Image (cartoon, rainbow, N blue to C red):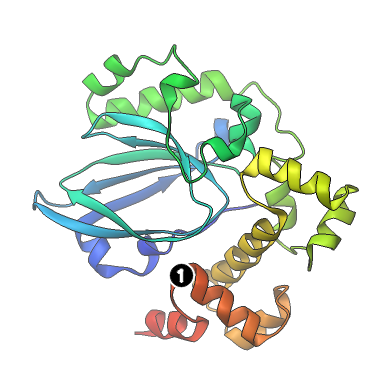
């Protein structure tokens, strides 16, 4: 199972004091959608909050409920400064890597590091009705719409690839291409179309998310973890963490212990 972690909701106490963040797995959508998520302010304070969006390979269906905006977006690298002006309400669906392309037929790079309005892909979605509802009513409306449009389809090989590889990511792009029985040039084309990412970035994301899960949920120390995750050496491990979340593994562990 591939279930990436978005670190602010785990570590950032300032964020958690201001925003109520929740994730829910929707069984009927689980072959394409990792979870439904929502963020709602705990109070009505008028302030700016800094959010961090960690690279996870996913393209989310995102709703800014206050501004009445809905569409698809993903990140090819961590965004360390994604400001939120409170009070604000958000909801969305974190889709499995590859699901966006399979379900919409559009290349994933059209929504990676961009925002693609839902109306461009699903003109039958009634945005006027959706935004006239209460937040909880709109949540159910969105879930029902996705179940109706997504649940009858069968995930293809690229939508199921991240869950297959997360437990033991290949050590190199060559190994990944060999596993898929494709040339490197074909892998580059297919990954750009399905994920909006290169094979190298996909492997880095898988390694990082595997290590992050082990550190945050199983409280595994860095030495034991290095033997399980496909990093070349300790320097590679530390640099990967620093690039993706701005912390070294030891800093992350210290943050948890404190």
* Residue 118 visible to the viewer: yes
* Residue 31 visible to the viewer: no
The image position of residue 247, as x and y in percent, is 44, 78
In the picture, measured across the screen, residue 24 lies left or right of residue 56, that is: left
Quick check: 194 above or below 238?
above
- Identity of the residue furthest to the front in this view: 185
Q: Secondary structure at mark 1?
A: helix
The image position of residue 89, as x and y in percent, is 24, 41
The image position of residue 167, as x and y in percent, is 71, 62
In the picture, measured across the screen, residue 44 lies left or right of residue 124, that is: left
Identified at 58% across, 34% down, the residue is 100
Q: Pointer 1: residues within 10 angstroms few (<14), some, or many (20+)?
A: many
Quick check: 15 above or below 124?
below
Identified at 26% across, 23% down, the residue is 131
> Which of the 4 image quadrants contains residue 140?
top left
Quadrant including the C terminus = bottom left
- Identity of the residue furthest to the top in this view: 124
Taking depth in this image into account, of 233 and 252 the one nearest to the observer is 233
In the picture, measured across the screen, residue 187 lies left or right of residue 241, that is: right
> Which of the 4 image quadrants contains residue 237?
bottom right
């Amino acid at each position: 199972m591939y279930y990436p972690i978005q670190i602010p909701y785990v570590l950032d106490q300032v964020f958690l004091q201001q925003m109520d963040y929740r994730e829910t797995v929707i069984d009927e959508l689980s072959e394409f959608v990792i979870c439904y998520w929502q963020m709602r302010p705990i109070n009505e304070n008028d302030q700016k909050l800094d959010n961090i969006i960690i690279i996870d390979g996913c393209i989310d269906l995102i709703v800014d409920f206050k501004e009445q905006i809905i569409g698809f977006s993903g990140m090819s690298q961590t965004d360390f400064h994604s400001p939120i002006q409170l009070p604000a309400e958000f909801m969305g669906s974190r889709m499995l890597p590859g699901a966006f392309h399979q379900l919409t037929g559009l290349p994933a790079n059209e929504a990676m590091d961009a925002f693609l309005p839902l109306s461009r892909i699903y003109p039958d979605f009634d945005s006027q009705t959706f935004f006239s509802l209460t937040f909880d009513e709109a949540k159910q409306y969105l879930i029902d719409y996705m179940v109706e449009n997504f649940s009858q389809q069968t995930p293809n090989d690229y939508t199921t690839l991240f869950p297959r590889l997360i437990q033991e990511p290949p050590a190199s792009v060559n190994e990944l291409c060999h596993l898929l029985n494709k040339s490197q040039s074909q892998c580059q084309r297919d990954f750009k179309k399905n994920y909006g990412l290169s094979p190298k970035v996909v492997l880095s994301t898988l390694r990082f998310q595997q290590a992050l899960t082990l550190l945050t949920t199983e409280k595994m120390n860095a030495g034991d973890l290095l033997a399980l995750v496909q990093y070349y050496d300790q320097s590679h491990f530390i640099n990967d963490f620093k690039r993706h979340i701005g912390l070294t593994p030891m800093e992350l562990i210290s943050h948890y212990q404190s």
